[in-house]
Amino acid sequence: DVKVTQSSRYLVKRTGEKVFLECVQDMDHENMFWYRQDPGLGLRLIYFSYDVKMKEKGDIPEGYSVSREKKERFSLILESASTNQTSMYLCASSLDPDRDRYGYTFGSGTRLTVV
Amino acid sequence: AQSVTQLGSHVSVSEGALVLLRCNYSSSVPPYLFWYVQYPNQGLQLLLKYTTGATLVKGINGFEAGFKKSETSFHLTKPSAHMSDAAEYFCAVLTDKLIFGTGTRLQVFP
């Protein structure tokens, strides 16, 4: 089975801190994604990557950046954490760079609280 | 732009009753469609996926979804709810990226 591993289940950070959320997948998937999940808003795409060193903005990229130095690892960076970034963050990966018809595989999520 | 609408943020059923979770998408071209389930404190798990040509898609745990192009709908059903079905369910549409609905929380009462 494909595994997508997010390094932390729960994080508490202070306003203004630089925060790194790590995601690793073990099935050689080309595509990786970061979503945030908020009640009543569903999942919103922050950034995605279809290849190493490549990144694309999703629907809500403001306040975030990403890094993909290796195919299996996709990091989400909060440059200066703010309280409105308190949320559940979900990483996902998939095959098939043209059409991801197989569905995405998700990690267990990181619940980030910014105080 | 593509969008997904899930009707009802909360649905409650009794154990053994029919489960119906509604999903409508907006597209003139049938996209790829998915249902995901999220159990408490877990990530999303693929429940089922629509493939071109099918009108009824079977998924895991006894769930199935009916695709109706004329109604742009992809509703999720299960004939008999079980307590373990209590979770949040997300409909998603894939065009150039995966777009999610806002989710429906299913509660199952004994």
Image: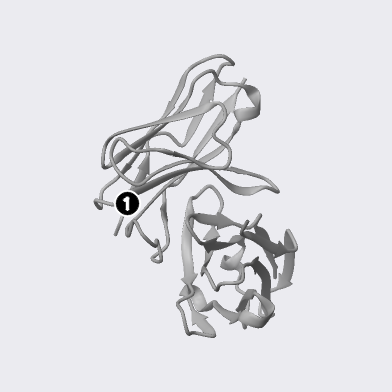
Quarter holding the C terminus of chain B? bottom right
Assess disc 1: are there few (<14), some (14-19) or many (≥20) residues with their C-alpha within 10 Å of its C-alpha: some
Q: Is residue A54 or residue A105 the one in the foreground?
A: A54
Quarter holding the N terminus of chain B? bottom right
Please state if B9 lies on the left or on the right of B46 as rendered.
Answer: right
| In this view, A23 is above or below B65 | above
Q: Position of residue B89 (x, y in %)?
A: 60, 62
Residue at image location 50% in from the left, 62% down from the top:
B94
Please state if B65 lies on the left or on the right of A25 as rendered.
Answer: right
- Give the colouring mode of the picture: one colour
Q: Secondary structure at mark 1?
A: loop
Q: Is residue A62 or residue A29 the one in the foreground?
A: A62
| In this view, A47 is above or below A26 | above
Residue corresponding to mark 1: A3
Q: Mark 1: which amino acid?
A: Lys
Q: Position of residue B17 (x, y in %)?
A: 69, 80
Residue at image location 46% in from the left, 37% down from the top:
A9
Number of labels in the image equals: 1
Q: Position of residue B78 (x, y in %)?
A: 60, 79
| In this view, A58 is above or below B27 | above
Q: Given the current orientation, which residue lies at the most extreme top position? A: A16
Q: Position of residue B13 (x, y in %)?
A: 72, 71
Query: What chain does mark 1 sit on?
Result: A
Residue at image location 73% in from the left, 58% down from the top:
B9
